[in-house]
Image: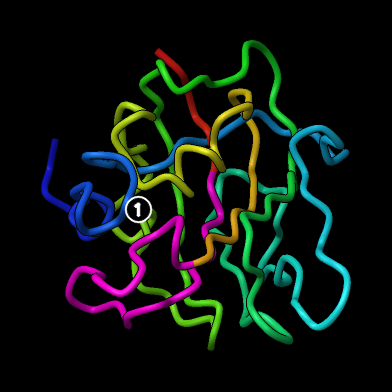
Amino acid sequence: MRRLLLPALLVVTLAGCGGAAETAAPTATSPSAAPSAAATAAAPAGPEGGVPGLTGEPTDLTAPTQAGPGTGAPPTELLTEDVVVGEGAAATLADTVQVRYTGTLWSDGSVFDSSWSRGDDPIEFPLDRVVPGFSQGIEGMAPGGRRVIVMPPDLAYGDNPPPGLPAGATLVFVVDLVGIS
């Protein structure tokens, strides 16, 4: 696997993240217009924000999209929202997935990594080898889907992020699950 920013960002140690030993990039799922109620966490009530809005044409899986900045206080638990619901068997933690993604910071919507910037080919990785927010966010997706995943710091990199990310950052990924193996 090529050494890319996201895989480098997602590789973590138990001490650094309090979670998985290593991580890799996300996968994409098949298109559908209706969000999945089972896989979608509702935005929390109160002052915390929900899933940020997306740029571009969010249901066009042939083109990248990204999340804008979050509003309100960042969520303290994992949030997901299916933009496009995939079809077929859903990803489990035992699977290897092929994904395309764009990762942004909740605070300002700035892109810190995108597989799309390196071409159309998906990134492949075992789902049990990524940070907990990534594996939990992708688990349950079916190929052909697009999901927004909002990761609080304790499910991402916490206070020990890789170079280029601020400590304690809430991350937002737009993930397309291309395949499962």
Is residue 181 shown left or right of residue 162?
A: right
Does the magenta portion include 83?
Answer: no
Which residue is depicted at the point 42% across and 41% down? 26
Is residue 88 shown left or right of residue 104?
A: right
Using the rendered view, name the quadrant where residue 118 is placed.
Answer: bottom left
**How far across and down, in percent of the image, does residue 70 sit?**
66, 80
Using the rendered view, name the quadrant where residue 109 is placed.
Answer: bottom right
**How far across and down, in percent of the image, does residue 101 sit?**
45, 51
Q: Identify which residue, 144 or 49, lies in the foreground.
A: 49
Say above or below: 181 vs 134. above
Is residue 176 shown left or right of residue 70?
A: left
Q: Quadrant of the C terminus?
A: top left
Say above or below: 177 vs 170. above
Q: How many marks?
A: 1
Residue named by callout 1: 115
Which residue is depicted at the point 35% across and 73% down? 112
Which residue is depicted at the point 73% across and 49% down? 59
Q: Local crowd at mark 1 within 10 Å, few (<14), some, or many (≥20)?
A: many
Q: Quadrant of the N terminus?
A: top left
Q: Identify which residue, 97 or 64, lies in the foreground.
A: 97
Span of residues in magenta: 153-175
Does the magenta portion include 164?
Answer: yes
Please state which amino acid type lies under the numbered disc 1: Ser
Say above or below: 53 vs 40. below
Q: Tag 1's secondary structure?
A: helix
